[in-house]
């Protein structure tokens, strides 16, 4: 129970990102920069309090793949935050959770992991579920369509991050997160400086509280609780509890904020989330 609670809390925190993002009147790249910067500072403090340290030899030895993971994380956040501006947050969250399907599709080619009958069936069901979700939106206004496209772009970057992280071994996960967030802040800082006017005055009294919550709570505390909980959980428990995130998002934005969601989209959500969950679970054969 001690490990279940932190992990569930982390998923619930991740599920509220959309409601924190909406009031922040900054470009998605700037939101991503501040969240990664503040989150990396917070987690660095946690790392020091836990008497852990950053292994710089590891960073130099794996500089290329760490930079690639930071770029993937940066792109993931930019497009995810952008999707929240155009479509309902429930739709953006569901599009984002298509990432495991991308990983399943690419696993045989990049990770040399063979497809099984169960995985192929889960991919087909997930695709059908996503068609139900997307179908209703693509009959609606252009903003909804654009929002879903941004959501799929975020999904592609997130799937890339998931695949890249499978090649990064022999390092503490919290330390890896601090490194990736710090590198992402550097990448995003350079990107924002090259593409837009950038100064701290953009953080006015209305914007700063939400940026602070996004960085400290949704990024820093969220990841911290995630790793505390993950250390004591088995793989199947992690897979099952990970779906607290989209469920919290759907409950908040459909039932509390009254965002529209059709029956077809709800059925699509069940098929998508259910199939990706089943694909990660291992069932014992009964004799």
Image (cartoon, helix red, strand yellow):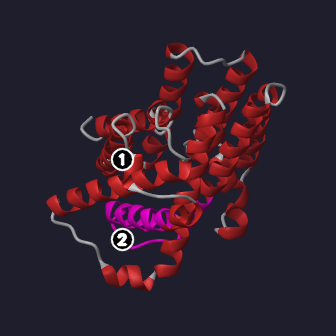
Q: Position of residue 280 (x, y in %)?
A: 57, 46
Q: Position of residue 100 (x, y in %)?
A: 62, 49
Q: Please report the residue visible at 60 percent of the width from the left and 18 percent of the height from the top.
A: 259
Q: Please report the residue visible at 82 percent of the width from the left and 29 percent of the height from the top.
A: 135
From the viewer's perspective, tell me whether residue 200 is left or right of residue 125. left
* Residue where numbered disc 1 is placed: 215
- Residue 97 visible within the image: no
From the viewer's perspective, tell me whether residue 52 is left or right of residue 237. left
Q: Is residue 179 magenta?
A: yes
Q: Is residue 245 above or below residue 55?
A: above
From the viewer's perspective, tell me whether residue 159 is left or right of residue 134. left
Q: Position of residue 24 (x, y in %)?
A: 46, 37
The image quadrant where one finds the C terminus is: top right
Name which of mark 1 and mark 2 comes first in the sequence.
2
- Residue 127 visible within the image: yes
Residues drawn in magenta: 160-189
């Amino acid at each position: 129970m001690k490990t279940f609670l932190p992990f569930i809390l982390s998923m619930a925190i991740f599920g509220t990102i959309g409601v924190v993002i909406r009031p922040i009147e900054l470009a998605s790249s700037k939101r991503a920069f501040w969240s990664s910067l503040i989150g990396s500072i917070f987690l660095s403090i946690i790392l020091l309090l836990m008497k852990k340290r950053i292994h710089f030899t590891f960073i130099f030895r794996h500089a290329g793949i760490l930079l690639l993971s930071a770029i993937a994380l940066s792109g993931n956040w930019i497009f995810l935050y952008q999707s929240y501006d155009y479509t309902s947050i429930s739709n953006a969250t569901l599009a984002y959770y298509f990432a495991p399907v991308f990983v399943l599709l690419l696993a045989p080619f990049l990770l040399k992991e063979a497809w099984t009958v169960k995985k192929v069936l889960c991919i087909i069901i997930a695709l059908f579920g996503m068609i139900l979700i997307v179908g209703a939106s693509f009959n609606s206004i252009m903003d909804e369509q654009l929002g879903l496209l941004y959501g799929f772009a975020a999904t592609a970057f997130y799937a890339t991050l998931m695949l890249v992280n499978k090649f990064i071994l022999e390092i503490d996960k919290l330390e890896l997160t601090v490194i990736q967030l710090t590198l992402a802040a550097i990448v995003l800082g350079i990107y924002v400086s090259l593409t837009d006017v950038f100064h701290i005055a953009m953080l006015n009294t209305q914007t700063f509280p939400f940026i602070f919550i996004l960085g400290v709570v949704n990024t820093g505390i969220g990841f911290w609780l995630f790793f505390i909980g993950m250390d004591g959980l088995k793989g199947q428990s992690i897979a099952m509890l990970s779906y607290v995130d989209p469920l919290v998002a759907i409950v908040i934005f459909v039932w509390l904020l009254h965002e529209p969601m059709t029956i077809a989209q709800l059925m699509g959500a069940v098929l998508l989330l259910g199939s990706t969950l089943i694909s990660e679970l291992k069932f014992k054969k009964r004799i």
